[in-house]
Every structure is written in structure tokens, then in C-alpha cells.
Image (cartoon, coloured by chain):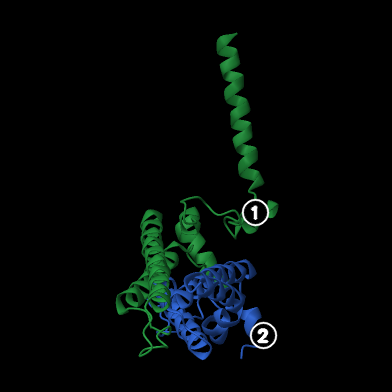
């Protein structure tokens, strides 16, 4: 989704630059006219307002850039602990991508890791049985080979 | 106003609050400078410029809400315009951009006003 945001912002910036150049040219032209044309009937014409198309282009460009920038912001994260932990449990790393598709640096991983790796939860009897079976099988293999 | 007991029953994640506030602040600073450019090109002066800034900043708040907050907070059962899923205070969300981006706004406003009407 990031190229949509970038291209929208770029398009808006081009429009804004064009509007800025147009406004600058317009004001330069106005000041040139007021100085060159010597007409005492209309002395104070310096305060000519901007043409409506330049104003509209400026406003539209600003709206487009705002939209593009808002599309480019990274997704927000829930602040309530249970909602946040549930999101991590459900989506894992995919829920914490930034705009470039990388996992963000302050992603902490499973919030229940501390509970799941607690040494008190290790089933030591089953592990001892598995180890004994592994020793027995390696002994048998050794006898077959030897 | 939630008390300390409420925060112990349903705790909040400080990293998420910081991330969300930073995201909103970056967005508001960028758009405030952009509004300065726009106001300078349009040639707004005095109160008109500040009025433009206030209106534009509030509308970017709505845009940010519609694009980033609403798509996930309304299915989660929050009321419309309720930002409590991502931000602690609603007032902070809707008005933080006004003070945060004012300096950038005035900077680019005066710069582009001077550039265009040289």
C-alpha cells in the first residue's frame, strides 16, 4: 500500500508547486502592469486577489497531500493491554509491520513468553523418560554397528 | 476519569501510547507546514490565516480518524468518533495538532507569502 501513498503525495506536491509558480507569476505580472501602465484613473490596483483557479488548485493540492500522508502513516496499536496482547496472539508479526513491510523495531513478540518458558512448567519426568529412551536407542544402534 | 484501580484492572501499554502519539504528531507537523505553504500561496493575512489553520488542522484530525482509527475501532464496538482504542484522551487527539504545528505553520506561511509576493 505504500506506493499508493507515495504516488498520491507526489502528485499533490507537483500540483502545489505548479500552483505556487502560477501565483508567483500572477503577482509579478500584476506588479509589472501597475508600474508600466500610467493611468491616473486607476491608481490602486496592487491588491488584486488571486484568480479562482489558482486558489482551487492550491486547496485541492493540499487536500491530496494530506490524504497521501495520512495513507502513509504506520498503523496504530491498541493501548489496552488485553486488546494489544490479543492482536499479537492472533496476527503475530504481521500486525506490527511498518509502511515498508518490515517488522518494526520495538516489536516485543509474544507477551506471554515469560509464562510459557517458566522453568516450573517444565515436565521433568517426561523429559527424563525421553532422554532414557534416546540413550537406550543409541545403545542399541551402537550394538548393531559394533 | 479512570482511577488507578481501573488501570490495574485493565492495564495500558505505554509503548503503544508512545507509538500512536508519535505517529499523530509526525503527521500533524507535516500537514501544519503544508498548510503554511497553502496559506502563503493564497495570500491570507492575519486572522484569516489562523482561521484557515484551525479549520484545516481539525479537518486533518477527521481525515486521520477516518483512515487510521475508524476502520478498526468501529468493528471493535466503539462508538463513532471515539478514539479510546488508540488514544487515552479524546481532547488530546482532537486538539494536540493545534499547538504542536503552529510554529511550522507560521514559518512556512511567512516564507511562502514573501516568496510569492516578492
Name the quadrant containing residue A44: bottom left
Is any part of residue B71 visible from this angle?
no
Find disc 1 in the rendering and name its residue: A121
Is any part of residue A5 visible from this angle?
yes
Rendered location of residue B21, percent (x, y): 58, 72
Q: Secondary structure at mark 1?
A: helix
The answer to whether tags 1 and 2 share a subunit is: no
Instruction: In this rendered view, identify the residue nearer to me: A107 or A8.
Output: A8
Find disc 2 in the rendering and name its residue: B5
Query: Which chain is indicated by disc 1?
Result: A
Q: Secondary structure at mark 2?
A: helix
Q: Relative to B86, say whether A2 is above or below.
A: above
In whole angstroms, how far apart are the C-alphas of marks 1 and 2?
31 Å
Select label 1 or label 2 by which is in front: 2
| B113 horizontally vs B9: left or right | left
In this structure image, what is the colour of chain B? blue
Rendered location of residue A94, percent (x, y): 46, 54
Binning the other alpha carbons within 10 Å of mark 1 as few (below 14), some (14 to 19) or many (20 upward) gives few
Residue A134's disc is none
Residue at 50% across / 60% down in the picture?
A: A89
Binning the other alpha carbons within 10 Å of mark 2 as few (below 14), some (14 to 19) or many (20 upward) gives few
Rendered location of residue B5, percent (x, y): 67, 85
The answer to whether the residues at label 1 and label 2 have Cβ atoms under 8 Å apart is no
Residue at 69% across / 54% down in the picture?
A: A120
Query: Which chain is indicated by disc 2?
Result: B
Chain that the image shows in green? A
Instruction: In this rendered view, identify the residue nearer to me: B113 or B14.
Output: B113
Rendered location of residue A15, percent (x, y): 36, 64
Amino acid at each position: 500500500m505504500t506506493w499508493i501513498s507515495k504516488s498520491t503525495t507526489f502528485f499533490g506536491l507537483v500540483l502545489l508547486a505548479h500552483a505556487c509558480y502560477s501565483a508567483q507569476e500572477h503577482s509579478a505580472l500584476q506588479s509589472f502592469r501597475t508600474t508600466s501602465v500610467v493611468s491616473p484613473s486607476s491608481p490602486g490596483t496592487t491588491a488584486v486577489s488571486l484568480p479562482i483557479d489558482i486558489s482551487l488548485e492550491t486547496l485541492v493540492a493540499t487536500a491530496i497531500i494530506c490524504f497521501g500522508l495520512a495513507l502513509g502513516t504506520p498503523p496504530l496499536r491498541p493501548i489496552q493491554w488485553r486488546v494489544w496482547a490479543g492482536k499479537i496472539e492472533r496476527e503475530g508479526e504481521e500486525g506490527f509491520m511498518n509502511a515498508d513491510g518490515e517488522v518494526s523495531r520495538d516489536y516485543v513478540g509474544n507477551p506471554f513468553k515469560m509464562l510459557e518458558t517458566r522453568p516450573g512448567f517444565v515436565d521433568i519426568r517426561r523429559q527424563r523418560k525421553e532422554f532414557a529412551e534416546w540413550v537406550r536407542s543409541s545403545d542399541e544402534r551402537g550394538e548393531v554397528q559394533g | 476519569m479512570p482511577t488507578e484501580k481501573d488501570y490495574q484492572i485493565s492495564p495500558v501499554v505505554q509503548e503503544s501510547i508512545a507509538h500512536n502519539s508519535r505517529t499523530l504528531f509526525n503527521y500533524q507537523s507535516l500537514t501544519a507546514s503544508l498548510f503554511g505553504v497553502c496559506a502563503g500561496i493564497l495570500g491570507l493575512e492575519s486572522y484569516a490565516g489562523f482561521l484557515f489553520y484551525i479549520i484545516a488542522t481539525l479537518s486533518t484530525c477527521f481525515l486521520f480518524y477516518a483512515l487510521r482509527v475508524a476502520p478498526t475501532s468501529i468493528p471493535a464496538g466503539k462508538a463513532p468518533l471515539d478514539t479510546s482504542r488508540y488514544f487515552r484522551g479524546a481532547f488530546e487527539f482532537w486538539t494536540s495538532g493545534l499547538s504542536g504545528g503552529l510554529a511550522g505553520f507560521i514559518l512556512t506561511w511567512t516564507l511562502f507569502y514573501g516568496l510569492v509576493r516578492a
